[in-house]
Image (cartoon, rainbow, N blue to C red):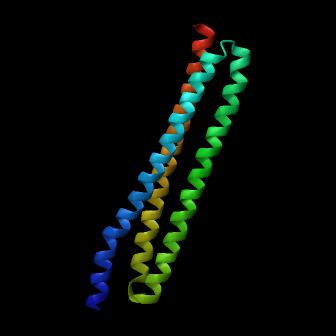
Amino acid sequence: MTDSITIIDRLHPKISETFRSVEEIFQNQVNDIKSQYKTQFALKAEELDNYFELKPELVKLHKEVISIINGRYKKAENIIETSTEELKQLIHEYIPEYHDLVDTYLDEELKNCKEVMSKLVREIKEEINDFAYACIEKVVFG
């Protein structure tokens, strides 16, 4: 019994650290994508100084970046969900007396991680929208 408690105590910080790691990796990836597309938006705005030529190009780029970010989110979400389920299975197998406690903890960590990533996606989408409109405004209003 004491061994089980020790295992749980040792797992807790590792699990938490793993979820934070996933969040950080995801954030770095989408920030890199955001930066690349902001650069592309700015270059298109310099290249195409006509609103009617620029808007369709920015709309195309915008759809592309949003699609990529959504894809990265889904991929990260699948990874953490799969890993969480695998960990639950291991806990159920090796220390079944704590599976309810660990399941609850893992579900909460998973929920928190998804919320952090989802919030980041919303913020980045908003930032990309704002930047695309700023590029258009720059062309239209000089």
**Looking at the picture, does residue 81 appear above or below residue 6?**
above
**Looking at the picture, does residue 91 appear above or below residue 114?**
below
Horizontal and vertical percent for residue 53?
A: 73, 18
Q: Residue at x 48, y 53 (%)?
A: 115
Horizontal and vertical percent for residue 90?
A: 46, 83
Q: Residue at x 63, y 10 (%)?
A: 140
Identity of the residue furthest to the top in this view: 142
Do we see residue 136 in this rendering? no
Nearer to me, 112 or 10: 10
**Looking at the picture, does residue 17 appear above or below residue 42?**
below
Q: Residue at x 49, y 47 (%)?
A: 29
Instruction: Give the quadrant of residue 18.
Output: bottom left
| Left-right relation of 22 to 48 | left
Horizontal and vertical percent for residue 21?
A: 40, 58
Q: Quadrant of the N terminus?
A: bottom left
Q: Residue at x 29, y 84 (%)?
A: 5
Horizontal and vertical percent for residue 56?
A: 73, 25
